[in-house]
Amino acid sequence: MEFIHDLLNNLVDIAILLFEYMGVLVLIIAGLRGIYNYFRKCPLTRLNLAKGMAMGLEFKLGSEILRTVIVRDYKEILTVAGIILLRAALTFLIHWEIKNEEAHNDFNNIPDNNNPE
């Protein structure tokens, strides 16, 4: 039974690291694309950056949820719960920003029927 417990801990530790690194990688790529699109004056820069940030945070949130599998005492549980709440709140705010930005872009892309062009 001890072997299975150690195996689970090692597997979860590896998965946590993988999710953390993927989240960081996605955030870095989204940031670099955001900088590139900003200088190109792309109108969807904010939207694409927000989507990249949301995806990166989803990976980070996944790693925190996995971390709950291996917590050992109440202090760790409270710490992980706090981190999960903060990341969930950030994810919610970013998705709200994405929704507003998409609505703003849809509103601005409505064709003008009075313009003959």
Image: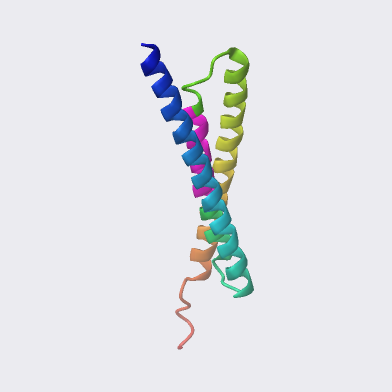
- Near-viewer residue (24 or 53): 24
Question: Relative to 24, does residue 17 appear above or below in the rendering?
Answer: above
- Near-viewer residue (76 or 98): 76
Residue at 46%, 34% (x, y): give it: 14
| Region of the chain picked out in magenta, as a range | 53-66
Question: Relative to 23, does residue 65 appear above or below in the rendering?
Answer: above
In the picture, residue 57 is in which quadrant? top right
Colour logic: rainbow
Residue at 58%, 25% (x, y): give it: 80
The x, y position of residue 61, in whole percent, is 52, 36
For this orientation, the residue located farthest to the front is: 3
Magenta highlight: main SS: helix
Residue at 52%, 47% (x, y): give it: 56
Residue at 63%, 73% (x, y): give it: 39
The x, y position of residue 114, in whole percent, is 48, 82
Residue 88: tell me if it is visible: yes
The x, y position of residue 104, in whole percent, is 55, 62
- Near-viewer residue (102 or 44): 44
The x, y position of residue 85, in whole percent, is 58, 30
* Residue 14 among magenta residues: no
Residue 6 lies left or right of residue 24; in this view the side is left
The tally of labels here is: 0
| Picture quarter with the N terminus | top left
Question: Relative to 94, does residue 39 appear above or below in the rendering?
Answer: below
